[in-house]
């Protein structure tokens, strides 16, 4: 299953830049690199030590393509576990393509997406969950997602699963041994210890499964819908949060006809703010479509920010409360932040009246950017970052989450079997299935289709 041919790809983003890195990995990688490289000190790459750098030129016959720096990593002490070289050349797209085409003529082939990391997995340099963390690390765009990916890539999640699997495997071996001596009616596995182990495994699995709720929002960002009537300052609030003129602001009601989305990192957590069309009765067909989309976005959001013009509360207070109740009843489980905008226009008595009518209200002025930081702190309070602060293992991968659910189901079957004195051969089947699900996470059990699905989502060159 392990390929031995040499692959090549651009390891840096495509396009012009100061430098570009071209990566080659495979049994003949160093020899192929040596065939096109002329050292300024007449060194042969094939005779150099691993983890060394060499200055020279890439030569296409007698033609000099570029002055480059070549890094040598000899297997198994390389990222892929194979002989690997990296050519740091100037970032011209022409130079990049000329060197890659030359390497293809010399016997390399273009790498598939994620093939360098796939080879690292196949050669035992990474387990499967660590390999998947590489893709998460590359795509991380805030502190929290970066922290989780780094912890997983270092093997935190893998170690936790491997420990559970090893303990369960030891008991599974004893259960299998009992089956070999079934006629003697002996027990090799201490049932009390086994029950304690199952309780411990169940506890850890439930904790890991529960962590997915936090991990998923950290990885993908928390969608926040900003809703309210037209012309109450939703677009102004979005601009204030993002500190840029992202949305059109106008005195004309109904300016926002479609949803506008943008992302902001607050306290290391990514939030996706959605500025929606104003909710009101209208005969405008286009605006009606926008309002329908607003309710769709509320459905998709995890937090709803309801904004109203606090200076108009005397006139429209009753209508506002009806609208609030409608949203609360339609989406009872979603956290709702009620914001009174344009608070800079209020008298002290009006502020006191508003707070007595709506105790949970947050008063701000989006235009003057007053109270925006209080809103950010309130949004951050909805995210349970305790596990993140304590450096606990947090599950972010849907495939891992699915395997953990299946493993928990099998462990609970084994527990039930133990408590009802189920025969060892039937319990052994459930134990094997639990072990299989653990193995699916780390890659101890795998197949070509699974690997294809995972690594197809990687970028080429990683």
Image (spheres, rainbow, N blue to C red):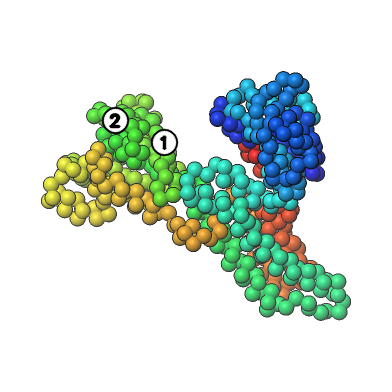
Q: Residues within 10 Å of mark 2 (few under 14, many from 20)?
A: some
Q: Residue furthest front?
A: 41
Mark 2 or mark 1: which comes first in sequence? 2
| Residue 399 rendering spot, x and y as whole percentages | 62, 49
| Residue 64 rendering spot, x and y as whole percentages | 69, 22
Q: CA distance from mark 2 to mark 1?
A: 15 Å
| Residue 70 rendering spot, x and y as whole percentages | 68, 36
Horizontal arrangement in the rendering, residue 350 relative to residue 131 (left or right): left
Nearest the eye: 162 or 172: 162
Nearest the eye: 186 or 458: 458
Where's the N terminus, which quadrant?
top right
Q: State the residue position of label 1.
A: 261
Residue shown at 60%/28% (left/top)? Answer: 90
Residue shown at 36%/32% (left/top)? Answer: 246
Q: State the residue position of label 2.
A: 249
The answer to whether 290 is drawn above or below residue 193 in the figure is above
Residue 43: in sight, yes or no? yes
């Amino acid at each position: 299953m392990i390929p031995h041919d040499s692959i090549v790809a651009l390891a840096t983003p495509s396009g012009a830049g100061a430098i570009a890195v071209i990566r080659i990995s495979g049994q003949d990688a160093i020899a192929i690199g040596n065939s096109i490289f002329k050292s300024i000190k007449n060194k042969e790459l094939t005779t150099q030590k691993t983890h060394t750098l060499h200055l020279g030129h890439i030569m296409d016959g007698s033609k000099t393509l570029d002055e480059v720096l070549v890094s040598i990593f000899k297997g198994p002490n390389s990222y892929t576990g194979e002989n690997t070289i990296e050519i740091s050349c100037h970032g011209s797209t022409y130079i990049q393509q000329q060197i890659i085409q030359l390497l293809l003529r010399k016997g390399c082939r273009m790498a598939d997406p994620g093939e360098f990391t796939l080879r690292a997995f196949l050669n035992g340099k990474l387990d499967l969950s660590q390999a998947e963390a590489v893709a998460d690390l590359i795509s991380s765009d805030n502190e929290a997602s970066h922290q989780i990916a780094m912890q997983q890539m270092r093997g935190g999640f893998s170690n936790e699963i491997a420990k559970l699997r090893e303990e369960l495997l030891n008991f599974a071996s004893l259960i299998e041994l009992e089956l070999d001596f079934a006629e003697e009616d002996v027990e090799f596995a201490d049932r009390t210890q086994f029950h304690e182990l199952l309780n411990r495994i169940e506890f850890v699995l439930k904790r890991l499964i529960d962590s997915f709720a936090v991990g998923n929002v950290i990885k993908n960002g928390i969608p926040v819908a900003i809703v309210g009537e037209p012309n109450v300052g939703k677009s102004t609030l979005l601009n204030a949060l993002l500190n840029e003129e992202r949305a059109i602001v106008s005195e004309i009601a109904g300016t926002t006809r479609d949803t506008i989305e943008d992302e902001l990192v607050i306290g290391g957590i990514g939030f996706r703010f959605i500025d929606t069309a104003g909710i009101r009765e209208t005969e405008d067909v286009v605006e009606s479509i926008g309002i329908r989309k607003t309710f769709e976005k509320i459905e998709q959001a995890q937090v709803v920010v309801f904004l109203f013009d606090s200076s108009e509360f005397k006139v429209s207070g009753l209508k506002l409360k009806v609208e609030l109740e409608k949203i609360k009843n339609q989406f009872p489980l979603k956290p709702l932040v009620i914001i009174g905008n344009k608070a800079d226009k209020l008298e002290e008595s009006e502020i006191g009246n508003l707070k007595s009518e709506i105790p949970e209200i947050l008063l701000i002025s989006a235009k003057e950017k007053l109270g925006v930081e209080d809103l950010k702190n309130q949004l951050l309070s909805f995210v349970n970052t305790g596990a993140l602060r304590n450096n606990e293992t947090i599950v972010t991968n849907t495939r891992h989450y699915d395997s953990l659910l299946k493993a928990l189901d099998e462990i609970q079957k084994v527990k039930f079997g133990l408590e009802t004195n189920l025969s060892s051969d039937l319990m052994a089947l459930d134990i094997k299935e639990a072990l299989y699900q653990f193995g699916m996470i780390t890659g101890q059990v795998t197949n070509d289709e699974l690997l294809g699905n995972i690594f197809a989502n990687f970028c080429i060159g990683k």
